[in-house]
Image (tube, rainbow, N blue to C red):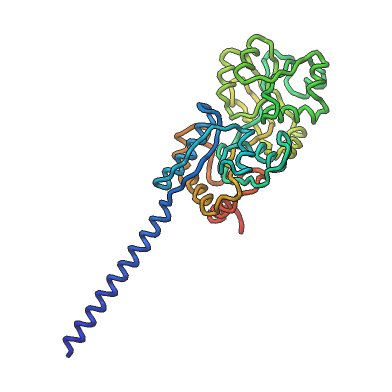
Amino acid sequence: MIMKRNSVLLSLLILLFLTACGASGSASSEQTEEKNTALQTIIIGGRTGGAWAVFTEGIAESIRREYDGSVITVEPGSIVENPPTVGMNKVPYGLSYTMTAYAAYKGEEPYDQPYDDIRAVSVVIPANYFQLVARADLGYDSLKEIIENKAPIHLAVDQKGSAGEIITRKMLSEYGVTYEDIISWGGSVDHLSGAKTFELMADKRVDVTGDAVSVPSSDILEASTTIDLKMLALEEQITQPVADELGMLTGKIQAESYNFQKDDINTVNTPAILLVNQNVSEEEVYQITKAIYENLDYLKTVHKEFENLAGENMMDVGDVPLHPGALKFFKEKGWIDN
């Protein structure tokens, strides 16, 4: 009888042990499954072959690395077109500047209606500074001097409605000046691409150009090898209202960022961010935010522009509302108070 009871007790112990092992294995399996949940989505970036296409592919590959089996498609887009495309949910994710994303969210220039379904996931490239570059032989060292003297400058800006063109126009308007005023002084205003601008600057047919680009900008560096350049100073009392109006940040281009730049330059900054439609699930956006964070070291190998991206500045998305999934991740990291 005793032997029988012992046999029953042993059988129960073995059963409990096997059950515990199975539960443990199941939990482990569930954790692995959660970690490796494959995602399938589309991200629009920049033109094929451009830097923004590289940025977008870097983000896509971060997601693939983090979640095995994920299918992340990268498609071409543009800084201005991407926000409404995401806002209308034609594509769930896209890259743009904070200033263009915020303008689309509010329905301000260059957009004719608000796209209030736009949400932010994360900063991608932390700094794109407005840089007003001039030929070194121009007789003025600041935008203020040009305006005070009603100088007949030949100004080149990007296409109307682009980030750099809007910022240039807003900078002028803070002084009460328009493109028409510059023309009336005997100057000119032309809408040109970066490459064409510096080609004409080398021929002394362009004096000044402004755009929001990285520091140092590869285009400016390349141009400085054949053209003597300088960076025009901007006043803080001008940069702050422009930043406030356009949903940007103020900042400084540090001295010696270029070999021709000896002093710090006050300016405005518009980070590049990953946008998402608000109807994408909280869990998916949480996973994507996490994937970017977990792959910061990888991103630094993709392009030098990622080198300044860190956990703490991922959420500096300007005035565009964060998606709840991104917000959940940042709260978990302790970067946003509950």
Percent x, y for residue 210?
68, 24
All told, the count of numbered labels is 0
Image height of 28 relative to 203, above or below: below
* Residue 247: x %, y % from top left: 70, 40
Question: Residue placed at 39% from the left, 55% from the top?
Answer: 33
Picture residue at 73% right of the left edge, 35% below the top:
109
Which residue is depicted at the point 74% across and 23% down? 142
Q: Is 295 left, or right, of 100 in this rendering?
A: left
Q: Is residue 250 above or below residue 14?
A: above
Query: Is residue 149 or residue 197 the one in the foreground?
Result: 197
The residue under the point 64% across, 23% down is: 262
Q: Is residue 58 left or right of residue 107?
A: left
Outermost top residue: 203
Q: In the rendering, at what x and y percent does residue 163 appear? A: 67, 31
Hey, which residue is sitting farthest bottom in the picture? Answer: 1
Q: Is residue 276 above or below residue 12?
A: above
Q: Quadrant of the N terminus?
A: bottom left
Expressed as whole percent of the image width and height from the top left, the position of residue 55 reads: 51, 34
The reply, left or right, for residue 179 in relation to residue 291 is: right
Q: Find residue 169 and report its image quarter.
A: top right
Which quadrant is the C terminus positioned in?
A: bottom right
**Nearer to us in this view, 200 or 141:** 200
